Amino acid sequence: MREIGIGIVGGGYMGKAHSVAMAAVGPVFETALRPQLEMICSRSAKKAERYRSVYGFQRATDDWKTLVADERVGAVIIASPPETHRAIAEAAFEHGKPVFCEKPLGGSLDDARAMTSAAKKSGVVNMIGFNYIRTPASQFARQLLSAGKIGDVTWFRGEHNEDFFANPDQPATWRSQGAANGAMGDLAPHMINAALALIGPIASLNADIQTVHRARPGPDGPVEVTNDDQAQMMIRFENGVAGHLMFSRVATGRKMGYAYEIHGTKGAIRFDQEDQNALWLYQAEDAPAERGFRKILTGPDHPDYLPFCQGPGHGTGYQDQIIIEARDFLRAIELGRSVWPTFQDGLDVSRVVATAHASHATGRWQSVSDF
């Protein structure tokens, strides 16, 4: 067992999640590599010091360059706004330090390409955060598909719908500005990643992207919303499977609507993150009177469940997904080679997002290979 100093850039929502995960992952998974909370960075020295005290870091800074260069920081986690990802990652790679970056990979497709290129050039371990696909239920869904339990896949439907911006009178925030913070930058990457992981590469798509509430209240009057609220796309996978994706941050009533349905020649699978400890399976081989979706509650026999709980149906939660990510990142560092999903996988998602914007602009089907 050896220790590694962890530096986290960003102390907010995801910064806290990764701090808690790194503090818990050692005893949960009995990892050979044990993380130490070495340094945390925030935009102000006051905030950084508060995060240091609350989360249990040794030191704090308001300069990410100081964190990246520090000799006691052995690995860097980027949990800051998307437009900051590229510079931090490139600097960390120059110092030869493994990098875990929250999605989206960068603030633009150019950023994602540059970050992936820097990762490959450095040969250093890299990983991007797509936590929802790591639930025991979704990991089990991947196993079922790989084993051919529902036959040849014919159709995929995926969505990531929430309602945190559904109220048109909700004031403008950073979420209402910049493409990387819209539904296509914030929500879409998770379900696009799921589609790629469950079915395979996307060949082409036809997208429609909308800004539903074009202005929001500001301190001095209405503020223009510069990004999208919702989007949908028809997709064709390289393996011939057809599908549909939908994303919305104004889907009234939906709190964590990350859901998918997969149809095959011998059955079907359904999943909804709002009931994340269950997977629904239909098998056509059942007797006619017994055919129907059956609910499978996750338990110790499903991937990455037992380290958290010995009781079937007791369930895992959001924070546990982040702990599983932390385990995978530490394992990659220990082995000296990146594990899925890498920066390349993040770039693949960014290419689909860019293709969708191009399709919307032209009103036509667009090939992902063009990007």
Image (cartoon, rainbow, N blue to C red):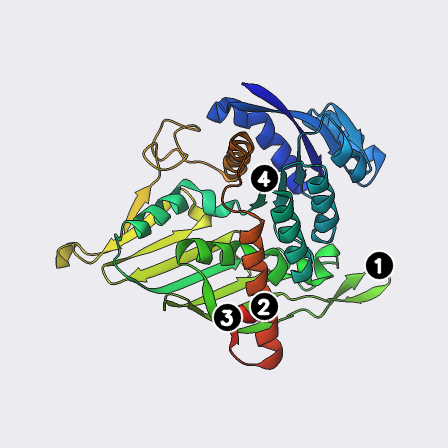
Q: Residues within 10 Å of mark 3 (few under 14, many from 20)?
A: many
Q: Total label count?
A: 4
The disc at residue 219 is: 1
Which one is earlier in the sequence, the residue at label 2 or at label 3? 3
Q: Residues within 10 Å of mark 2 (few under 14, many from 20)?
A: some
Image depth: mark 2 or mark 1 in front: 2
Q: Is residue 206 left or right of residue 102?
A: left
The kind of residue on which mark 3 rests is: Met
Q: CA distance from mark 2 to mark 3?
A: 17 Å
Mark 3 and mark 4 in contact? Answer it, CB < 8 Å: no
Q: CA distance from mark 3 to mark 4?
A: 33 Å
Provide the secondary structure element on which disc 2 rests: loop
Mark 2 and mark 3 in contact? Answer it, CB < 8 Å: no
The disc at residue 125 is: 4
Q: Is residue 295 left or right of residue 327?
A: left
Rendering quarter of residue 77: top right
Q: CA distance from mark 2 to mark 1?
A: 40 Å
The residue indicated by pointer 3 is 233
